[in-house]
Amino acid sequence: MPVEIFRAALFHTPKNPFHEADALIHFDDGALAVEEGRVLECGDYARVSAACREATVHDLRGGFILPGFVDTHVHFPQTRILGGLGYTLLDWLEQLTLPEEARLADANYAATVAAEFVDALAAHGTTTALVFGSHFAGATAALFDAAAKRGLRVASGLVMSDRRLRPELHQSPEDAHRDGCALIEQFHGRGRLRYAVTPRFALSASEAMLECCQSLLAACPGGLFTTHINENAKEIDEVARLFPWARDYLHVYERYELVGRRSVLAHNVHARADELRRLRVQHASIAHCPASNAALGSGIFPMSLHVAAGVRFALGSDVGGGTGFGMIKEALNAYLMQRIAPAPMILAPAMMLYLATRAGAEALAMDEETGDFSAGKSADFVILDPPRDGVLRTRLRRAESPDQQLAAVFTLAGTESIREVRVGGEIVFTRPG
């Protein structure tokens, strides 16, 4: 397969800008050389093209090349309930979310929603996602099939609950274990798919169900664990009532050996200092969902405390509690919320890019495969081409530095600017027209 060179302004963050200097790598006239779906090298176009004289060149000047976006927390069954404003978490679940999730018992309906969901991910530049599946094994299988067909890198799993939801969303631990094992056997490690053991949250999982999660995780080498934690004050109080032996919310999951390097816990808005310490020691990650936290009134993520504690975190759209699939917008939401946080942080453009790309790959233990343009990694990337008569294009003409360019992209770019998305060098989305 011949080498391809993609020529445009190029940005990536192979280092963590929260802790390391000079993390943002930028080439104004950049080149991404791709061979057999892998990054051969990236750098200044003159140098890369001289080293790859026989390459096919795609001239995309005027546009931008960014690593594919990584969404660390998103619910596929909630695609059709986006825009449910005016609720708090538990009311939103009861009145809007759970009735919709129950509809996925219908196999045809589930397959339609799964196709809509993966199409939306691709159209927004998301190449890798950790996805809450469905309470129904058939619907979760439909998600895996749709992701494989589209070519996305997806980790997901059966959502496991045996109490406090609608009865039709409950499973026995025995049934959940059986269905989880079958899904692992069918999908884990198939192409770009991975399995994630996924109890909905401690509120809806009995101790027997958490023991089932522990068993499934042990039976799934290389698999992930994901759930919710410390999202809403009422939720936290109820978890304390249901698990009187637990010293805090995190302890519930720790007791069943569910917290470790491959664990991604969503939200952690109301984290305690000792929980942060233990998360760092256990190398677990947090999916930070700023739009959802604001829309549901859950609170402001204490980012500065996570940074100080050395806890890994990345971005999640949290569709449908959030406000859309776009990780560009989610990074902007993170910036805005941190400006008004009790302990505010100013996110530099490099931090925003890192949170939307490499940080997510690190959280999912996929950073050796994707997240930036280091040589040998999968060629997962987004080509941005802002409309010629749009405000973003006008602003970019006045940008005086790479930081200003990237800040303008995160402030003003939407799906209209996404020209093409590739995973492993393969096109998964092209903007019509």
Image: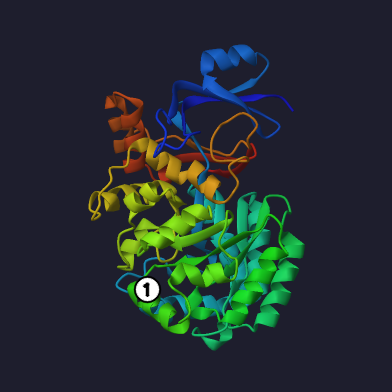
Instruction: Say which residue appears at 61% left-offset and 78% top-offset.
Output: 209
Position in image of residue 281 (x %, y %): 50, 53
Confirm whether residue 298 shows in the render: yes
Task: Give the camera-side residue of 53 and 404.
Answer: 404
Task: Name the quadrant of the N terminus.
Answer: top right
Confirm whether residue 288 shows in the render: no
Give the number of callouts: 1
Instruction: Say which residue appears at 63% left-offset and 51% top-offset.
Output: 150
Q: Is residue 322 left or right of residue 216?
A: left
Which picture quadrant has residue 400? top left
Which picture quadrant has residue 76? bottom right
Position in image of residue 152 (x %, y %): 61, 50
Instruction: Say which residue appears at 30% left-offset and 68% top-offset.
Output: 297
Instruction: Say which residue appears at 49% left-offset and 85% top-offset.
Output: 164
Q: What type is the residue that disc 1 sits on?
A: Leu
Task: Give the camera-side residue of 34 and 173.
Answer: 173
Looking at the image, residue 204 lies above or below residue 414: below
Position in image of residue 395 (x %, y %): 28, 32
Q: Which residue is mark 1?
A: 89
| Residue neighbourhood size for the residue with mark 1, other residues' Cα within 10 Å, grouped as few (<14), some (14–19), many (≥20) | many
